[in-house]
Amino acid sequence: QKEVEQDPGPLSVPEGAIVSLNCTYSNSAFQYFMWYRQYSRKGPELLMYTYSSGNKEDGRFTAQVDKSSKYISLFIRDSQPSDSATYLCAMSAIETSGSRLTFGEGTQLTVNP
Amino acid sequence: ETGVTQSPTHLIKTRGQQVTLRCSSQSGHNTVSWYQQALGQGPQFIFQYYREEENGRGNFPPRFSGLQFPNYSSELNVNALELDDSALYLCASSPGLTGELFFGEGSRLTVL
């Protein structure tokens, strides 16, 4: 069983839709949770970074962490064609080296004009 | 301020050969991590270097090795290449042992 599970999609939505992306995890030691966006043939770009449970909002993006359910989400409001990319969740445990991230396999998102 | 830069961007090797990939960390960052991303998969942690010392290693065999230099740039070396080593190799830097990683564009390795 993978430590981090993420639905690979693909997910296709019309422009302006609200997008919900999710990951589940099994390692209760994970404390830091991140979402990265990766365009085709590019490196991942950090979108959101949260510590422990709760919500964090940045513009059209909202990240939620529910440690009791071992479940994290990323919401994208008013989605744009430029949001079309692969979205990767990532997490790390407080006792490991901080930059040792465990990634999900990514969800491929297409926003249609 | 320049970001993380990697070279080469693309390369093709044959099975059994050796390869060296290079990474320049973002200015002010002293920690470099390397990840392997197979097609359609998320990145997998190879190892991390902090102040020129290896500081954590993922589930990769010893033929994957690395170095970090005094200017915090880094190299990833892979010996005895196998077909399954074909992947995008990502370098990431951070200002310390934190989770906020900044990735380069990657080096795409094809092993024939």
Image (cartoon, helix red, strand yellow):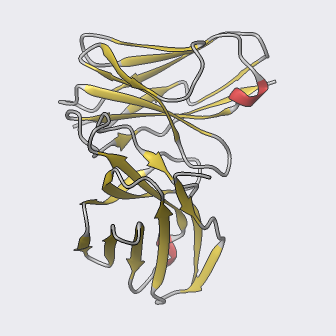
Quarter holding the N terminus of chain B?
A: top left
Instruction: Farthest residue to the left: give it.
Output: B28
Quarter holding the C terminus of chain B?
A: top right
Instruction: Count numbered badges in the picture.
Output: 0
Residue at 60% over, 19% down: B61
Q: Which of the pair B110/A28 is nearer the observer?
A: A28
Quadrant in the rendering for residue A85: bottom right
Residue A46, placed above or below residue B27: below
Quadrant in the rendering for residue A74: bottom left
Tell me residue A47's x, y (percent): 34, 61
Residue at 35% over, 47% down: A92
Tell me residue B35's x, y (percent): 50, 34
Q: Which of the pair B43/A70 is nearer the observer?
A: A70
Tell me residue A106's x, y (percent): 56, 59
Tell me residue B83's x, y (percent): 78, 26
Q: Is residue B101 left or right of residue A80?
A: left
Residue B38, placed above or below residue B47: below
Residue at 48% over, 40% down: B105
Instruction: Farthest residue to the right: give it.
Output: B112
Residue at 54% over, 69% down: A84
Residue A85, placed above or below residue B54: below
